[in-house]
Image (cartoon, coloured by chain):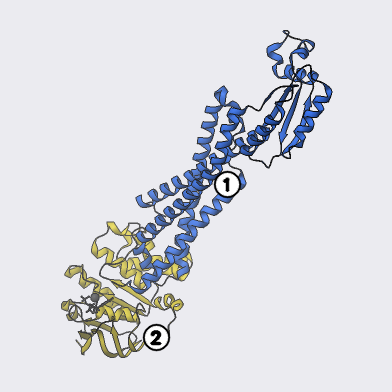
Amino acid sequence: MKWTPLKISLLFIIFLSQLMVLAGFLTYKNLNTVLGSWNKSAHLSVYLKTDILGSERAEIETKIRENQNVQTVEFVDRDKAAKEFQKSFGEYSAGLLTVDELIDLVPETFVVSLKNDLSLLQKVEVFNELIASTKNFSGVDEVSFGGDWLQKFSKLDQTLKSIGTFILAVVLLSVSFLSALMVRILIDDAKAELEVYTLIGATRWFIYKIFLREMLAFVILSLVFSFVTLFGLFIYLKNVFLVRNMTLNFADRLEFLSPQEMIIFAILVGGFIFVSSFISLKTTIQRLNQFSYD
Amino acid sequence: MIELKHIYKTYGGELHSLRDLSFTVEQGEFVFLVGPSGAGKTTLFKLISAYEKSSSGDLVVSGHNLKELRVGQVPFFRRQIGFIFQNYKLLKTKSVYENIELPLVILGEKENIRKEKVLEIIEKVGLQDHADQFPDFLSGGEQQRVAIARALIHQPKLIIADEPTGNLDPALSDSMMNLFYEFSKTGITFLVATHDHRLLQNKKARVLSLDKGVLVEDRIA
Ligand SMILES: Nc1ncnc2c1ncn2[C@@H]1O[C@H](COP(=O)(O)OP(=O)(O)OP(=O)(O)O)[C@@H](O)[C@H]1O
Ligand SMILES: [Mg+2]
């Protein structure tokens, strides 16, 4: 195969379009997992007053469990809460406070988590219901679920799911159209060549073989280029997030495409380009067989 | 080799591009096809090489009745014919050697046999020093000789040449015709359409004259 400027620009365009689709998919996938993990870890804390009666505590728990969307209600007593506090902040509080001293400062809590088939948005609603039904107990000090940011992200989650799917579909369609067009141009460019082949008695399959082999080279090269470029971009961005404290956790969760995803993508793109080149070839050869003499 | 019986060809309209054409060409004959522009020479070639079907009449080429030829058989039928054109129709992305080799590749010949045959014919057309060059860097006469070598390499039964000397100067035309005559001795049938009446004077050959789609003369000149 000879690399003409047309073929190089075709390769570049196919590469760019694949990169676009892949980058879109990768972003979508990672935002989804990040949001998904937020969703899973979303919980409501009901802080109790120190002087609460055991009977009221049981009443509150029953009230919480009445809600059908509640998955688990965990009671964290003072002892446990203090230990946990020590565990997470041990390095900072070392020597300042003992567990015994902490116990008086840390309140007892109910930690409520919801069923996981709920979306973030639905969870926020249920949390608000639970707040309304528990905050009037005299033994309840405070109820909270990190409301503000959760509410914001629940909206993002919803928007992302619908807009993301839509955009991905649009990009996929336009990229398919673009590559079909480029294949068409390439084959039109090779018309003189095709004509010579039909003239000296090449069968259709002989011609298909030559051109499909060329398309295969295109598909493989452009796929390799786009995977490698995407991986480079991914590593670069991950490092950028990793060095910033604020995004460290987020960066930790970022994942590249899995081998299965790459294989599926390669098969889809390769298959599509193959089918569209096959169709263009077929119609071009048919046209040539009628008027190829002049 | 070629047998036409009452061949008509129209492209839709009233006008007949070919009208009631009947003649026979025997294996090994050398035939010139002459006539003014629009006489129907190219049209006749299109019918003979199965690019188009006649509107009516019977056309038998090398034992094949072209009316009954199926699309899938056309490539195999064409392998019995070598084509030579005014504009050469070479593959620009392949070298002289590869261009000449192509018909053998299509036939599925083995590498060593291909090499032997290409080297033999490339010397006959005097291009052995240009084997690795690409067509765009050759002169018109050299390109035409590549086209001739390609048309002849697989030893077709019939050579069809449409205005083969159109882009050549008189000296090159003569040397090309001499090549034709030489190969004609091996029993290949030649059908050469031309405007160039000078070519007819070189050798005794059969001349078919067409005018407005009608055969007006069939003589030995
Ligand atoms: N595809 C076509 N559609 C309609 N008319 C055609 C077509 N091909 C040829 N013709 C007509 O058939 C007639 C014969 O054309 P043809 O090309 O056979 O002439 P020719 O003898 O080869 O002329 P020239 O010496 O200029 O090459 C012309 O009148 C031409 O207009
Ligand atoms: Mg013509």
* Extreme residue in the right direction: A55
Q: Position of residue A132 (x, y in %)?
A: 67, 30
Q: Which amino acid lies under the numbered mark 1 shown in the image of this protein? A: Met
Q: What chain letter is assigned to the residue under label 2?
A: B
Q: Which residue is mark 2?
A: B67
Q: Position of residue B198 (x, y in %)?
A: 16, 77
- Which residue is drawn at the image coordinates 39% and 78% (left, top)? B80
Quarter assignment of residue B104: bottom left
* Residue A262: assigned label: 1
Quadrant occupied by the C terminus of chain A: bottom left
Q: CB under 8 Å between callouts 1 and 2? A: no
Label 1 to label 2, Cα distance in Å? 52 Å
Q: Judge whether B13 appears above or below A290 on screen.
A: below
Chain letter, colour yellow: B
Chain letter, colour blue: A
* Residue B3: assigned label: none
Foreground residue, A165 or A215?
A: A165
Q: Position of residue B211 (x, y in %)?
A: 19, 85
- Could you tell me how many numbered marks the image carries? 2
Quadrant occupied by the N terminus of chain A: bottom left
Q: Which amino acid lies under the numbered mark 2 shown in the image of this protein? A: Lys
